Image: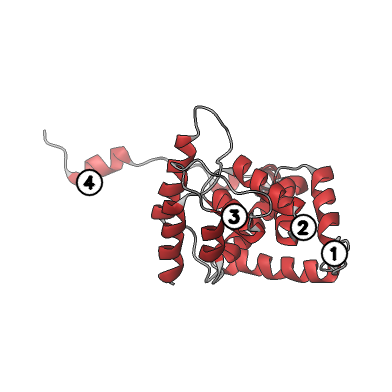
Amino acid sequence: MTSTIDDLLARAAVPTSDPRAFDVAAALRRLAADAARLTPPPEIERATEAGQMLSVVSRWVLNEPGAAVHMDRIAVDPEAGALLTEEQMDVDGAVVFACLLHLTGHPESAQFWWQFAAGAGSGAAAYCLHLHHRRLGESREARHWYHQVTVRMEDGSLAPDESFIEGLETVARYVCQNGSAANAPTGGLEGEVDRLASRNANSHVIVHWPDRRLAEQLHRFTARR
């Protein structure tokens, strides 16, 4: 005999337990325990926040009107084999390159170029290193670079004080939560950085020296805004 639709639905129904047997208090305790396990420890939250802020600051640097010009000044011709001397180096160009490397997934290379620029007196590079080490949970290194941002520079000029840094971080947190008008690198920029990285893959971990192709791509990126 063919079963009716009602018969099939009746047999397929999942039996429910008696609601009087449900322990609400126990269920709430389980939910609270699950929530506690899902909440990351404070050091993880601080590291995550530092990483987000570093990406915000890097996008700001990359979207600066003069970013492509500074990149031009450190771009080299790999065929010519001539590298810039320390006196010829554009420190702001090194910061731009480091921020681009960070945003395109090359953190070790970014650290190398930030350190180069910070050693030449760049407060922006020192601040990026502070966030970079905070992101990695390296507290001692993070404190060192924070100190470098806030001390008096060798040429006698005043570095930003702690209240300025706190204000900057407040703005960066707001941008993390609400978005930013500063564009992230395009696929074209990321592709050019990956090309440079693959060129050095057999001999170096660090991405050395931007070239003219990358500088031209950055010009196109800044012109589209």
Question: Helix, strand or loop at disc 3?
Answer: helix
Measure the alpha-carbon separation of dots 3 and 2. 17 Å
Quick check: 219 above or below 197? below
Quick check: 60 above or below 113? below
Q: Name the disc covering residue 173, or none.
A: none
Q: Which residue is the site of mark 3? A: 99
Q: Amino acid at mark 2?
A: Gly
Say if mark 4 contacts mark 1, CB within 8 Å: no
Q: Amino acid at mark 3?
A: Cys
Q: Which residue is the site of mark 2? A: 121
- In the picture, measured across the screen, residue 83 lies left or right of residue 130, that is left
Q: Which residue is the site of mark 1? A: 155
Say if mark 2 contacts mark 4, CB within 8 Å: no
Give residue 78's position: percent from left, percent from top.
Answer: 46, 42
| Label 1: few (<14), some (14–19) or many (≥20) C-alpha neighbours in 10 Å | few
Mark nearer the viewer, 1 or 3? 1
Mark 3 or mark 2, earlier in chain: 3
Mark 1 or mark 3, earlier in chain: 3
Measure the alpha-carbon separation of dots 2 and 1. 9 Å
Measure the alpha-carbon separation of dots 2 and 4. 80 Å
Give residue 27's position: percent from left, percent from top.
Answer: 64, 45
Q: Which residue is the site of mark 4? A: 6
Q: Amino acid at mark 4?
A: Asp
Mark nearer the viewer, 2 or 4? 2
Mark 3 or mark 4, earlier in chain: 4
Q: Amino acid at mark 1?
A: Asp
